[in-house]
Image (tube, rainbow, N blue to C red):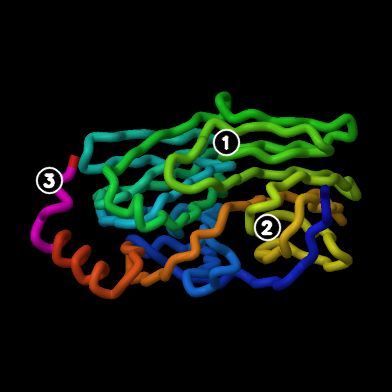
Amino acid sequence: MSFQTTVKKIIPTQPTSDGDGVKIRRIAVFNDNAFSPFLMLDELKSDDNSDYIGGFPPHPHRGIETLTYMISGHFQHRDHLGNQGELRDGGAQWMSAGKGIIHSEMPIMKAGQLLGFQIWINQPAASKLSPAQYQDFQSETIPVLSTETGVRLKVISGSVGIENEWIEGPLQQTSINYDVADLMLADYQSVTINLHADHQHFLYVYQGTVQTDEQHIGAGSAVLLSEGTELKIQAEKTSGVLILSGKPIHEPVVHYGPFVMNSLQEIEQAIDDFNSGKFETYE
C-alpha cells in the first residue's frame, strides 16, 4: 500500500567554512533523530577557486560514513590506508571511517564551476569500530533513469523508484540502508518518486524551485518529509533535487568535530586514540 509524503519542516542552509577555509553551505542535523541516519549535508558551490583553494588537509574520522557527489568539478581523496581517487564530473565516492581513518580532500574546479555535496551518514554502534573502507564511482557507472517527459533520476546509493520503476545505484551499504539520488526536472515537469516505507526521507533543493505538498521550496533549502512511499514533486522552473532516504538508527548520537559516537566516553577514547597515533596504525 502506498501513501504520499507531506512536508514536516523546511530548513535553509547556513554559510560556513571548513578545512583550510573552504566556503560551504551546511545542513547539520546531528541532534535531530527525524533525519537519521543522516547527520549533515555540505554543499560546495563556487565559480571562484579562492573559495576552496586550501581544500581539506589531512584530518581524522571515526564512527561515520561519508558520501561525496560532484556534479561539476573534480574531487581528490587520499588516506592513510593508501587509497587514492579523483572524482570527475558526475562521480561519487564513499568512505566508511569505522574505527578510524585519516584522509585529505581537494576540490578542483573544472570549466569555471564547482558544484558538489558531501553527506555524513551515521554508523550503528555495531559498525563504529569496524575497519575503514573506501570506494569511488565515476559517472559512467552511476545509472540514470529518464521518463518519456524528460525527467531524469540518477541513483547513487541504494534504490529509488520513478513512476513505479525502481533503479539501483552502484553503492550498496554494509552498515546501514540508505538511498541517495539526484532528481533533475525542467520547467513545470512533475513526477512521482517511489521511496521505501521503513525509511525516513528528506530533500535538498540545489537548483531552481519545486513544489510538493503545496509547499514552494527554493534552492538552498532542505525539506524533512513525513513517512510515505510516494513523493509527488513538480518543478516551477528547471530544478535539481537531492533525495536522501534511510533506515533510522535508534541510538544516542554524541558528536565532537570529526567523531560521531554513542557516548561522551567513546568520544574521549577517539580523541585519545588519535592523539596517541593509533589511527595511523589501523589497517
Q: Residue visible at 50% across and 54% down? A: 119
Residue 254 appears in which quarter of the rendering? bottom left
- Secondary-structure class at tag 1: loop
Q: Which mark is residue 203?
A: 2
What residue type is disc 1 on? Answer: Gly
Q: Which label sits on residue 90?
A: 1
Q: Specify whether residue 197 is painted magenta.
A: no
Work out whether mark 3 precedes mark 2 in sequence or the reverse, and give the earlier one: 2
Q: Which residues are magenta?
A: 275-282
| Label 3, label 2: how far apart the Cα atoms are | 38 Å
Q: Is residue 264 above or below residue 45?
A: below
Q: Position of residue 219 (x, y in %)?
A: 70, 61
Q: Earlier in the sequence, mark 3 or mark 1?
A: 1
Give the crowd class for mark 2: few <14, some 14-19, many >=20 residues within 10 Å.
many
The percent position of residue 78, horizontal first and vertical second, equals 29, 41
Looking at the rendered structure, the kind of residue marked 2 is Leu
Visible residue check, residue 54: no
Expressed as whole percent of the image width and height from the top left, the position of residue 227 reads 72, 60
Tell me if mark 3 has few (under 14), some (14-19) or many (20+) residues whose alpha carbon lies within 10 angstroms of its own: few
Q: Which residue is mark 3?
A: 281
Task: Name the secondary structure under disc 3.
Answer: helix
Q: Position of residue 111 (x, y in %)?
A: 56, 39
Magenta segment main secondary structure: helix
Q: Quadrant of the C terminus?
A: top left
Front residue (pair 271, 194): 194
Q: Nearer the viewer, mark 2 or mark 1?
A: 2
